[in-house]
Each structure stands twice: as structure tokens, then as C-alpha cells.
Amino acid sequence: MRISEVSRRTGVSIRSLRYYDQKRLLCARRLENGYRDLDEGTIERVQTIQMYLGLGLTTEQIEEILACTQTSPLLHPLPVCEEELLALYQDKLQDVEHQIVVLTALHARLAERIACLERQLRTQ
């Protein structure tokens, strides 16, 4: 199927699909006319990529996950894949928690500056 069909069926832009192909997240075959030819499994793969992107993972991390799970002949990931996923998720959660601390401190500083400026405006 052509990339435009994958885009229509997944809601992902053609530009993003080309980027996924460039990053080796998709396995597109090239036709003689240069068009990408994608199989039916691409729909599910794009949805999986979108899910991982939604978790804040990088394309490099997603590539590692897909490569690991792709080597499994079973429908379920290999235990080593699950261990790697768990470690990756734990690292990502730790990053998010750190960002929350940083943003909470920033929020407090901004709220303090706003309150200070509002007091100054009221006294003028």
C-alpha cells in the first residue's frame, strides 16, 4: 500500500511516515517508480510507534524496542525485551518526575514574581 493510504488510515502525516522510514522504524519497499510500498502490518506498527512517542520515548529508543520484539517468533515479547522495556519505562518515569520537580519550582517562582508585581501595581 502507498504511504498516502497509511497516512489516511492512521491519521499520521506523510511527512512523519517518511521520517519513520528514514529512522528505520518502518520497513518500506521501494517500487520501480520510487514510491514506498508498505504492507498491511504497517498500520499496527505506526500505531505502536505513536503509542511509544506518546510516552515520550525517542525514535532511537523505539527502534531498539521494535528490533527486540521483532526477533521474537511469538506473539508476546521475549523476557529480555520486557526487562529492557521495564528499565526504559522506569528511566523515563524518573525523568518525568525530575521535570515535575523543576517545573513545580519554576511555577512557584513565577507565582511569587506575579504576586510581587501585582502588589506594586496596587500601591501605585
Image (tube, helix red, strand yellow):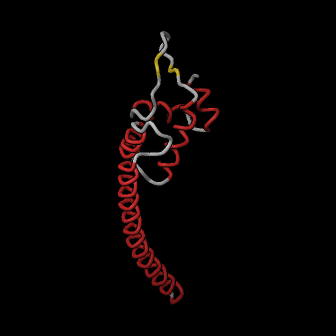
| In the image, farthest residue toward the front | 74
| In the image, farthest residue toward the top | 32
> In the figure, is residue 80 to the left or right of 12?
left
Residue 52 percent location from the top left of the image? 47, 49
Q: Quadrant of residue 9?
A: top right
Q: Residue at x 62, y 27 (%)?
A: 5
- Quick check: 1 above or below 112? above
Residue 14 percent location from the top left of the image? 54, 31
Q: Residue at x 40, y 69 (%)?
A: 97
Q: Is 89 in front, or is 13?
A: 89
- Quick check: 109 above or below 66? below
Residue 73 percent location from the top left of the image? 44, 36
Residue 105 percent location from the top left of the image? 39, 76
Q: Residue at x 38, y 48 (%)?
A: 81
**Quarter the N terminus occupies:** top right
Q: Quadrant of residue 10?
A: top right
- Number of disc labels: 0
> In the figure, is residue 121 to the left or right of 103?
right
Q: Is 124 in front, or is 92?
A: 92
| In the image, farthest residue toward the bottom | 123
Q: Is 30 in front, or is 106?
A: 30
Q: Residue at x 46, y 17 (%)?
A: 30
